[in-house]
Image (cartoon, helix red, strand yellow):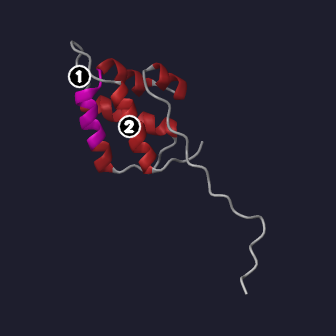
Amino acid sequence: MTRRSIPARHLVLVALLAVALFVVGCANPTGDECKKAIENIDRIHGITNTVPAETAAAVRKCRTAASKESVLCMRDATDEAALTKCGAKPAPAAPAAPATPAVPAAPAR
């Protein structure tokens, strides 16, 4: 698993929460349920460097925009395939490492 950067985390959370829009008649998830789902999504995607303020903002958005069913599904997911079944979009691919020359270039004269 590769470690993703914080900007990728934003894209993943926005995509996940956009897919899991609130459905009329469904109860909203609690803050704790949203936090656990977000932590699980981060764990599955290999994200380790989280910023508390970003997590708090994601929890607030989750509580108003996601259905309880989708949040509980994402909280209990064990892998990327399970997240997709919950309605989540796949995580964006990590950017490729820049190519480095095999032999250093000769200094200019």
Residue type at mark 1 is Asn
Q: Position of residue 44 (x, y in %)?
A: 50, 35
* Rendered residue at 26%/35% (across/down): 61
Q: Secondary structure at mark 2?
A: helix
Q: Earlier in the sequence, mark 1 or mark 2?
A: 2
Residue found at x 30% / y 39%: 58
Front in this rendered view, residue 9 or 34: 9
Front position among marks 1 and 2: 2
Predominant SS along the magenta part: helix
Q: CA distance from mark 1 to mark 2?
A: 17 Å
Q: Per the image, is 4 magenta?
A: no
Range of magenta residues: 57-67
**Which residue is labeled 2 in the image?**
13
- x, y (%) of residue 91? 49, 35
Is 35 left, or right, of 88 in this rendering? left
Image: 8 above or below 44: below
Please name the amino acid that badge 2 sits on: Leu
Quadrant for the C terminus, please.
Answer: bottom right
Q: Position of residue 20 (x, y in %)?
A: 34, 24
Does residue 21 sit above or below 40 in this rendering? above
Q: Does the magenta portion include 66?
A: yes
| Quadrant of the image containing the N terminus | top right
Label 1 sits on residue:
28
Relative placement, left or right, of 29 versus 97 is left
Looking at the image, which residue is at 52% across and 42% down?
46
Is residue 105 visible from the viewing direction of this image? yes
In the rendered structure, the answer to whether residue 82 lies left or right of residue 55 reads right
Asked if residue 79 can be seen in this view, the reply is: no
Res 74 → quadrant: top left
Image mark for residue 12 = none
- In which image quadrant can residue 26 be found? top left
